[in-house]
Amino acid sequence: MNNCPTEFSVSVIVPVYNGGENFRLCLECLKNALPRPAEIIVVADGDTDGSWQLARAFGCRVLRLPSPGGPARARNMGARSAEGEILFFVDADVMVPPDALRHVTTAFEREPYLAAIFGSYDEQPGEPNFLSQYRNLLHHYVHQTGREEASTFWGACGAIRREVFLTLSGFDEQYGRPSIEHIEFGHRVKRA
């Protein structure tokens, strides 16, 4: 039996619609990620602010949709074109820590039957207003104190084996705006 860890290739997929400054910060974080992802695919979902150009300047592979169709459609488009064994979905306003990809690959290396994982809000929200602080810290608490085995998925910071994602036909594109498409998908992953 080979005891050497498997090196998984990771495709990072970022759907974006008019990402602004948070999108730039997201790309900076992904650029500094170690290990480096095999590819960063940005799906510009009908953006009108030039987000796709910023992604291209960062060296990302850019796919463009002519009009907004929601994150489910954008994530699916990115997943279908991805080459990595692991699909790591990151929303355009999420700043992953430099070791996020290492956590992802380590989890899949340790658990050969693991289908998917997702991240957690951290304890230091970036937005200073009360409502953002409250909501982010509440999510952090729920993520940190909940059961380790989940029956959902989080598209803002979640990774899944590409084979599993494609077998389940990805996110339900009937959700044309950000909604519960990732939760619904998580339920299908759990049932499968």
Image (tube, helix red, strand yellow):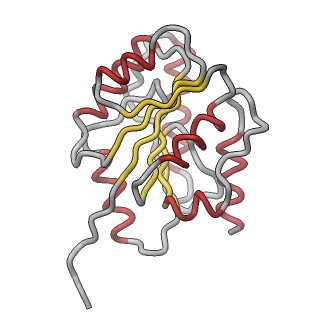
Q: Position of residue 79 (x, y in %)?
A: 53, 47
Is 166 rendered above or below residue 109? above
- Taking 13 as reference, is 172 left or right? right
Residue in the image at 32% along x and 53% along y: 103
Is 175 rendered above or below residue 51? below
Q: Position of residue 100 (x, y in %)?
A: 32, 45
- Which one is nearer the viewer's eye here, 4 or 132? 4
Q: Quadrant of the N terminus?
A: bottom left
Q: Residue furthest bottom?
A: 1
Q: Position of residue 11 (x, y in %)?
A: 39, 48
Q: Position of residue 27 (x, y in %)?
A: 34, 26
Count of numbered tags = 0
- Can residue 125 be seen in this snapshot? yes
Quarter occupied by residue 41: top left
- Taking 65 as reference, is 12 left or right? left
- Can residue 137 be seen in this snapshot? no
Residue in the image at 65% along x and 38% along y: 72
- Which one is nearer the viewer's eye here, 24 or 56? 56
Residue in the image at 56% along x and 41% along y: 155
Quarter occupied by residue 175: top right
- Which one is nearer the viewer's eye here, 14 or 93? 14
Q: Quadrant of the C terminus?
A: bottom right
Residue in the image at 35% along x and 35% along y: 96
